[in-house]
Image (spheres, grey):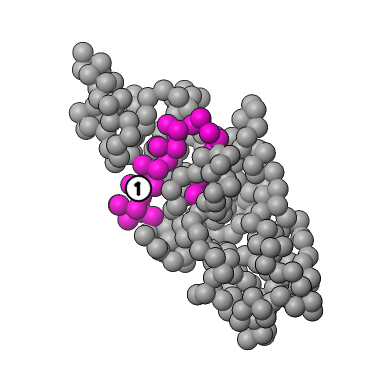
């Protein structure tokens, strides 16, 4: 009888941030303050015993894949918290910026959620589901430290003699094409290689995010991010998934809210040297 009452209690509180404590049991793993809705995509993942997480693995310090196949980063740790909340294992699936949308929408599904440096946009929300933001971001530049005073505005960048490097298929390339009509835009396939190419003179600067630039400035003294505190855009990074997974979306949002409330999200920001904006 108690299990039946608990089942209906979970259904009634499906869209609330917490589950009645009396309904917790050892068969349904939950986070301290987040809920796992009954049925749907969440039930499928729990039954499988593993959540499949798509990530590019090329975006330090949010998602990076080492040569031995291990993943690390801010987004990777958020994904691990989501898996822990579900009580399942986690498997990372390689995706790319050009194929991200196709991979999310694929049938059969390539993965359950996508995570990393994925900006929340209206265009993505039209086609897919996106969680609430867990990290603030914005477009900025990475250039050689010796030329930091050269670039103080978009006007300084948008000149024919300025070589701007971007990775293909993502919002960095889109921003460059829409806002830099005079600069020379160079598309390089591997995002993780671009900072080194900038430092070595392969281009003058790269379009990047305020989440990525500080890592490279700290890692390489040849680089600078002179517009870090004055980004061209302002946005949020979130978790991306296919429509029809509203139960999973609610669970992810609950987990993000829990991480904000208990301080664990702030600690992640501090660990990776990112600005906490919540």
Magenta span contains residue 250: yes
The image shows residue 151, relative to residue 207, as above or below, that is: below
The image shows residue 4, relative to residue 184, as above or below, that is: above
Q: Which residues are magenta?
A: 238-265
Percent position (x, y) of residue 59?
61, 57
Q: Residue at x 60, y 53 (%)?
A: 64
Q: Residue at x 49, y 49 (%)?
A: 238
Q: Residue at x 40, y 37 (%)?
A: 250
Choose top left, top right, bottom left or bottom right for residue 200: bottom right
Magenta: main secondary structure: helix
**Image quadrant for the N terminus?**
top left
- Name the residue tied to disc 1: 257
**Image quadrant for the C terminus?**
bottom left
Percent position (x, y) of residue 266?
37, 59
Element assignment for label 1: helix
In the displayed structure image, the side of residue 5 where residue 72 appears, left or right: right
Residue 138 in view (yes/no):
yes
Percent position (x, y) of residue 177?
72, 62
Magenta span contains residue 235: no
In the displayed structure image, the side of residue 91 where residue 275 appears, left or right: left
């Amino acid at each position: 009888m108690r299990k039946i009452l608990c089942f209906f209690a979970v259904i009634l509180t499906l869209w609330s941030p917490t589950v009645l404590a009396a309904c917790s049991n050892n068969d349904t793993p939950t986070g301290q303050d987040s809920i796992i809705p009954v049925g749907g995509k969440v039930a499928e993942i729990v039954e499988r015993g593993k959540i499949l997480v798509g990530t590019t693995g090329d975006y330090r310090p949010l998602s990076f894949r080492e040569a031995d196949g291990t993943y690390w980063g801010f987004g990777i740790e958020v994904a691990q918290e989501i898996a822990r909340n579900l009580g399942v294992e986690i498997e990372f699936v390689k995706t790319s910026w050009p194929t991200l949308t196709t991979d999310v929408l694929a049938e059969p599904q390539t993965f359950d959620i996508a995570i990393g440096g994925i900006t929340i946009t209206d265009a993505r929300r039209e086609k897919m589901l996106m969680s609430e933001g867990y990290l603030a971001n914005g477009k900025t530049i990475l250039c050689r430290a010796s030329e930091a005073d050269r670039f103080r505005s978009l006007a300084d960048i948008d000149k024919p003699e300025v070589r701007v490097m971007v990775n293909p298929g993502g919002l960095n390339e889109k921003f460059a094409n829409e806002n830099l009509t005079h600069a020379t835009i160079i598309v390089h396939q591997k995002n993780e290689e671009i900072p080194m190419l900038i430092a070595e003179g392969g281009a003058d600067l790269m379009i990047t995010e305020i989440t990525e630039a500080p890592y490279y400035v700290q890692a390489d003294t040849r680089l600078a991010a002179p517009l870090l505190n004055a980004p061209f855009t302002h946005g949020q990074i979130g978790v991306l998934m296919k429509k029809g997974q509203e139960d999973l979306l609610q669970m992810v949002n609950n987990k993000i809210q829990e991480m904000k409330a208990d301080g664990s999200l702030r600690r992640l920001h501090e660990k990776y040297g990112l600005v906490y904006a919540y």
